[in-house]
Image (spheres, rainbow, N blue to C red):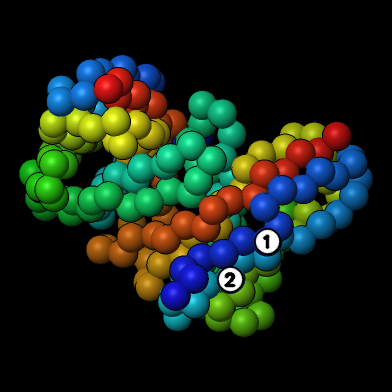
Amino acid sequence: NAGVTQTPKFRVLKTGQSMTLLCAQDMNHEYMYWYRQDPGMGLRLIHYSVGEGTTAKGEVPDGYNVSRLKKQNFLLGLESAAPSQTSVYFCASSYQGGAGNEQFFGPGTRLTVL
Amino acid sequence: SQQGEEDPQALSIQEGENATMNCSYKTSINNLQWYRQNSGRGLVHLILIRSNEREKHSGRLRVTLDTSKKSSSLLITASRAADTASYFCASMEYGNKLVFGAGTILRVKS
């Protein structure tokens, strides 16, 4: 099993450009999550999904959109990138939410917005 | 921000010593989890303690939870150079969301 994979690993954008980050998991997990990690701030939840076709807002959703058209994939979109979105983005998945369910993380995507 | 806090922010010890990291959180929780992150990598789950548990062990790891103080601690015994990493606590609030602390950077010197 590959676990959780993220594409791309690195990306540099100019302000105003758009892009999509792809997350894929092969563990048949119901729940998927997108986080951003900034220096000294731990991880903050952007959006999450509790199943195919569903999405919900996390702590810092502004400027991002997501889609979960297939159970194994969770896409994070930036429609008009801003320098404040420079960060490392992590995708995670879990079998279910709630008690007793650890999250499995991808290796991260390092995004720089100039 | 809903984030909890971790203490200390950074810790440097000699190989063989014990390392203790503390975590505080803000709301009622279902469980609390600890994760490790090696430099440039994703997070890896270490251990989970439920809200009705007070202490849990896994190999060289010992986690305690005090729900009255909304705090947890992670003890790594007999540390090794390979334990060098950032350690994050994450509180599982009711509603399926993990809230991460800012992390403790542990350096184990050989």
Residue A114 % position (x, y):
85, 34
Circle 1 chain: A
Front in this rendered view, residue A15 or A60: A15
Label 2–label 1 contact, CB within 8 A: yes
Residue B77 % position (x, y):
13, 33
The quarter of the picture where residue B11 lies is: top left
SS assignment at label 1 = strand
Residue with the mark numbered 2: A24
Residue B30 % position (x, y):
25, 54
Q: Marks 2/1: CA distance?
A: 9 Å
Please state if A72 lies on the left or on the right of A84 as rendered.
left
Please state if B4 lies on the left or on the right of A100 as rendered.
right
Observer able to see residue B5? no
The amino acid type of the residue labelled 1 equals Thr
The mark that comes first in sequence, 2 or 1, is 1
Give the residue at x 29% y 35%.
B83
The amino acid type of the residue labelled 2 equals Ala
SS assignment at label 2 = strand
